[in-house]
Image (tube, grey):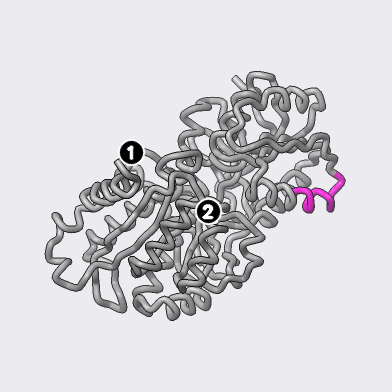
Amino acid sequence: MTTHQHSKRQLIKGAAALGALAAAPRLWAQGSPVRIGYAIARTGPWAAGAQVSQEPNYLLWAEQVNAAGGLSVKGTKRPIELIGYDDRSETETCVRTYEKLMGSDKVDLILPPWGSGANFAIAPLANRHGYPLLAPTALSRKLIDMNLPYFFSLLQQPDKMMGALVDMLVANNVKTVAIVYMDDLFGLENFAALNNALKKTSIQVVERKSYPLGVKDLAPVLRGIKDQNPDAFIGITYPPDTILASRQAREVGLNPRFFYASVGTAFQLYKNVMAANTEGVIGMGSWNVKTSPQAKAYFDAHVKKFNKEPDRWASGHAWAGLEILQQAVDKVGLDRKALREHIAKNEFKTILGGIRFAGSENASIPGTVSQWQGSDFEVVWPKDRATAQLNPNKPAWK
């Protein structure tokens, strides 16, 4: 079966799942569908993140909007038709697919791919074609600094996230840290931001080690770190590495006061795999059901549809991006230049609270740190956004 056939089959399945045609034929009489295109990882190394933080949200959103009569385009409701393809975790496939969606298919709107690298490749293309791109999983200051008018980043950037982490460590008298980081755009940028933040403190870095994408063994590095006995371990990691580092830290007996791993710590998968050993682990997170009544409603709807929880970081930002797009289309319609202007100049109500942009960047949500406490990933820093108090001493691995 060709990739194209595979993608189309996925699309047909998606349309059937949404039930837009079957459940509400009257919608289609109200106007042609709003065609919304995207490429996302369903296979390959990016799929672990993409299939938690992004594509489920696209499907749930389209289903909810269609069930309510369709997407309001300046007050006229039209059904959403999602056109989604598997980018196979390949930047080249991702670029080629968006080029087709925007160039020859001329879809009405696009939704973003997963991850910093893919967004870095797609953002200039979206800008050239004049499509607003609201990215919930791009953590890249370099991308922000490109000042692309059609690109909007919903996540807090490396300087904010690493700044919040270091502030928290300083406030809890941490003296020594060890760092491992992924050798790619995400890892390198966050590592640089972390080093910049640490330079302004008296915290000593006892180890800095990079590792490649697809790493299978971190035990030797973790043993070396254990010998240094740091107060804090910081892993700038993707979901598979977050689990690998946590499992192997337990195996080698590395149990500092603070154990931080970046992407995937906020996933239900992490909780499922690590079970009682999640307790006290910290990582990138920014919301949970206590954040707002709307956040709880979204969380419950997600669990009901997919029988799995959204993650407590980028899933919320992905949903907020869809809310912003929906509010903007309601106000100004599908003229993409008008959409871009409206998104750039206004504040929007979302499940995470008010969001407005300063240039490309979400200016409303500060850097945050979350921690597993019992069954939830609680926001513990900064204190004014916290849903629970930080536990400054991670319990021993079980």
The image quadrant that residue 323 belongs to is bottom left
Question: Residue at (65%, 52%) from the top-left corner?
Answer: 161
- Along the horizontal axis of the image, is 146 left or right of 80? right
SS at mark 1?
loop
Residue contact between numbered discs 2 and 1, judged by CB atoms under 8 Å: no
Tell whether position 324 is magenta: no
Res. 59 mark: none
Residue 310 visible? The answer is no
Helix, strand or loop status at disc 2:
helix
Viewer-proximal residue, 352 or 56? 56
- Asked if the stretch drawn in magenta spans residue 195, the answer is yes
Residue at 73% x, 52% y is 193
Q: CA distance from mark 2 to mark 1?
A: 28 Å
Task: Determine the main secondary structure of the stretch shown in magenta.
Answer: helix
Where, quadrant-wise, is the C terminus in this rendering? top right
The residue pinned by badge 1 equals: 307
Q: Classify residue 242 as left or right of residue 342.
A: right
Give the amino acid type for the residue marked by disc 2 in the picture: Ala
Q: Please name the amino acid that badge 1 sits on.
A: Asn
Magenta range: 194-202
- 2 vs 1, front mark: 2
Q: Position of residue 214 (x, y in %)?
A: 58, 34
In this rendering, the answer to whether 223 lies above or below 309 is above
